[in-house]
Image: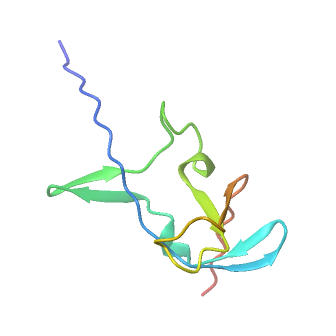
């Protein structure tokens, strides 16, 4: 018999980006992790029951100039992530 135990982790980090237009934000590719290191174990970051898509794992906050004052910020859901990398 296999004992499957589900664990949840709340991983929060702040990253900056540039608003290109009403549909596009440019930011660093490394903000989309493929795995997390938790207590010495590597945990893959994949869609799951709580976050069915990669996009649902992220929230964009526009107009936040002071992280202690969110009163003027606007929160937007992410509808599409496109990673573009060139060498």
In the image, residue 64 above or below residue 56: below
Where residue 14 appears, as percent x and y from the top left, is 47, 71
In the image, farthest residue toward the right: 22
**Residue sitting at x 53%, y 50%:** 57
User: Within the image, what quadrant is residue 11 found in?
Assistant: bottom left
What coloring was used for the rendering?
Answer: rainbow
In the image, farthest residue toward the top: 1
* The N terminus - image quarter: top left
In the image, residue 66 above or below residue 50: below
Image side of residue 6 versus residue 60, left or right: left
* The C terminus - image quarter: bottom right
**Residue sitting at x 51%, y 41%:** 47
Q: Pick whichever, 85 or 18, lies toward us.
A: 18
Where residue 12 appears, as percent x and y from the top left, is 40, 60
User: Within the image, what quadrant is residue 27 found in?
Assistant: bottom right
Image side of residue 79 versus residue 38, left or right: right
Where residue 71 appears, as percent x and y from the top left, is 61, 64
Q: Pick whichever, 63 or 76, lies toward us.
A: 63
**Residue sitting at x 28%, y 35%:** 7
Where residue 64 appears, as percent x and y from the top left, is 60, 74
In the image, farthest residue toward the bottom: 87
**Residue sitting at x 14%, y 58%:** 40
User: Within the image, what quadrant is residue 80 found in?
Assistant: bottom right
Image side of residue 73 versus residue 1, left or right: right
């Amino acid at each position: 018999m296999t004992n499957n135990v589900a664990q949840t982790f709340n991983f929060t980090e702040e990253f900056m980006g540039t608003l290109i237009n009403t549909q596009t934000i440019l930011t660093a590719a490394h903000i989309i992790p493929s795995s997390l290191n938790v207590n010495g174990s590597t945990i893959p970051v994949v869609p799951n029951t709580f976050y069915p898509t990669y996009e649902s794992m992220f929230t964009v906050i526009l107009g936040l100039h002071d992280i202690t004052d969110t009163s003027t910020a606007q929160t937007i859901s992410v509808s599409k992530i496109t990673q573009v990398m060139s060498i």
